[in-house]
Image (tube, rainbow, N blue to C red):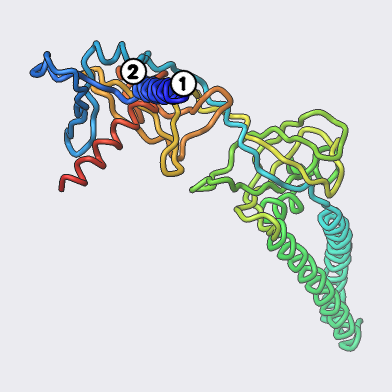
Amino acid sequence: MNNKTTIVIITQTLIIVVLIWIIILLGDKTIIGINPDEEESDEEVVIDYTTIINGITQIKLPSSVEANSNIQYRPLESTQINQKKLNYGLVQNISQLTKAKTNLANINHQIEKLNHQLKHEKNHLEALKVLNADDKNISDLAINTKQIEISDLDNEINIHVSEKINILNMVKQQWGEVFADALKNKNHPLNKILKNKNQLISLSITQGDREQTPPKNIVIIPSVSSTSEIKAKLLARSPIVDKSIIGKNFFYVTNNNKLTIGERISAYALESNSNQTFLLVPNSSVIWSNGQPWAYVRIKDNGNFVRRSLQGMHEAENGWIIPAGKIKMDDEIVTNGAQLLLSEEFKYQIKNENED
């Protein structure tokens, strides 16, 4: 009786092991084909579907294998890229500029006053010379005294002119040529900034901009002020260096004065690349290999599948945005089965390496 029980247990165990083995074989997700030359054989033969064309690995599947492997693909869709690429800046304190403006106004007033006095004294000197020539009605000493007074006035004017030049040079060095010009011209548009009707923003252009070309118009996102987004226009290159941000600095002028002086702000370009066409690679198409994103496309010309890199492309919420030309518009993007295609490609790469 014990022997029979033991035999039954062993038999059941063997059946379970065989069933598990069958389940494992049936659950293998490798693309498998049957060798047509061995129809009477029950042996499954793995077929190499890869081919090399112009140095690029492509996968060519029979339609029956595509269907059995549930490989799905569809045309690429065009999309718009929302390039709200943030740059960072600071609301500038222009008290130094307003002080320079006040000092220049005082100096100009003094120069104007001295020039008026100088003109008067020169006319007086000419009158004295006439009297001196008329039988010495005015002494030579009086003429010499007047000439000294005129020389002193000239020196005083030159001192004020030098002060004016120094102030303008300081402004040019620290704020740029555009503000030096503004201080010399009462009707300059930038006087609205000096009157606190507009505000000055220093913005650093960074985030991978190779040429660091500043956008002409930006939208400012305040960090402290309760005001909503504010538009600003490009003014000029800024000589101000913000050591906390690496990049080229540019001045922008707002259309109001609602920001807080010294406030850190972020901003994005108002312009869009509407002239450039972009394509959307859906998230379901993206696979990762060696730390890089990839996608498979089905080539229209030959129906083969080929892997394309998405490295460096723009990742969005619903997929990856790539410029037209990265993948041909006529090719179709694989939306299901990309991981399976990747396994096939790598499997035969390993197989070929082992054979070598």
Mark 1 lies on a secondary structure that is loop
239 left or right, relative to 327? right
337 left or right, relative to 115? left
Kindly identify the residue that appears in the image at 80 percent across and 43 percent down: 193
The vertical placement of 84 against 162, above or below, is: above
Name of the residue lying farthest toward the front? 1
Nearer-the-camera pick, 188 or 149: 188
Q: x%, y% of residue 106? A: 89, 60
Q: x%, y% of residue 239? A: 66, 58
Nearer-the-camera pick, 105 or 263: 263
Which of the 4 image quarters holds residue 37?
Answer: top left
Q: Which residue is mark 2?
A: 332
Amino acid under disc 2: Glu
**C-alpha distance separating marks 2 and 1:** 68 Å
Disc marking residue 233: none
Q: Which residue is mark 1?
A: 1
The vertical placement of 215 against 329, above or below, is: below
On the question of residue 279 being in view, the answer is: no
Q: Dot 1, crowdedness within 10 Å: few (<14), some or many (≥20)?
A: few
Amino acid under disc 1: Met
